Image (cartoon, grey):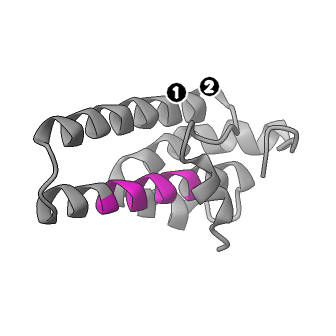
Amino acid sequence: MNDKTEIPEEYIKKGRALAWLSYFGLLLIIPAVIQRNNPYTVYHVKQGMGLLIVNIIVAFICLSVNINPITCQITSAVLLVINVVGIFNAISGKAKPLPLIGFIGELLNF
């Protein structure tokens, strides 16, 4: 789903209440189960899942490979900003992909 795809307003109104939880790690299970038939919520669950995957990969790399800690901190800060953007989009009724990593969520098919 991209910016040009329109989600009916009724789904957005119903989905906004829980879609923001998609950006809090494993809490994305809650909106995924409760509103699994709402395309707005499913969109944000996919974006949150993509963010979770990237966070896990970054954490694994930072903990297992000898990388400069400052690089890991900067990467974590960027991911935190992306997370806040996702929460803001979900609350404000926007179905926009996350910056830099949104394509991962759009590749997920469930």
Q: Secondary structure at mark 1?
A: helix
Rendered location of residue 100, percent (x, y): 55, 41
Horizontal side of residue 53 vs 70, given as left or right = right
Horizontal side of residue 30 vs 36, given as left or right = left
State the residue in front, 83 or 71: 71
* On screen, residue 83 above or below 22: above
Density class for disc 1 (Cα within 10 Å; few <14, some 14-19, many ≥20) is few
Q: Which mark is residue 92?
A: 2
The residues colored magenta run 46-57
State the residue in front, 71 or 9: 71
Check disc 1 and give the amino acid type.
Phe
Query: Which secondary structure is most common in the magenta stretch?
Result: helix
Rendered location of residue 57, percent (x, y): 32, 62
* On screen, residue 33 above or below 105: below
Density class for disc 2 (Cα within 10 Å; few <14, some 14-19, many ≥20) is few
For the point 23% across and 61% down, which residue is it?
61
Rendered location of residue 13, percent (x, y): 70, 36
* On screen, residue 15 above or below 39: above
Check disc 2 and give the amino acid type.
Ser
Q: Residue 6 occupies which quadrant of the picture? A: top right
> Can residue 48 be found in the magenta stretch?
yes
State the residue in front, 51 or 69: 69
Q: CA distance from mark 1 to mark 2?
A: 6 Å
For the point 64% across and 53% down, which residue is it?
103
- CB atoms at circles 1 and 2 under 8 Å apart? yes
State the residue in front, 63 or 24: 63
**Residue linked to disc 1:** 88
Q: Secondary structure at mark 2?
A: helix
Query: On the rendered image, what quadrant is the C terminus found in?
Result: bottom right
> Can residue 49 be found in the magenta stretch?
yes
Which residue is at the far bottom?
110
Rendered location of residue 25, percent (x, y): 34, 54
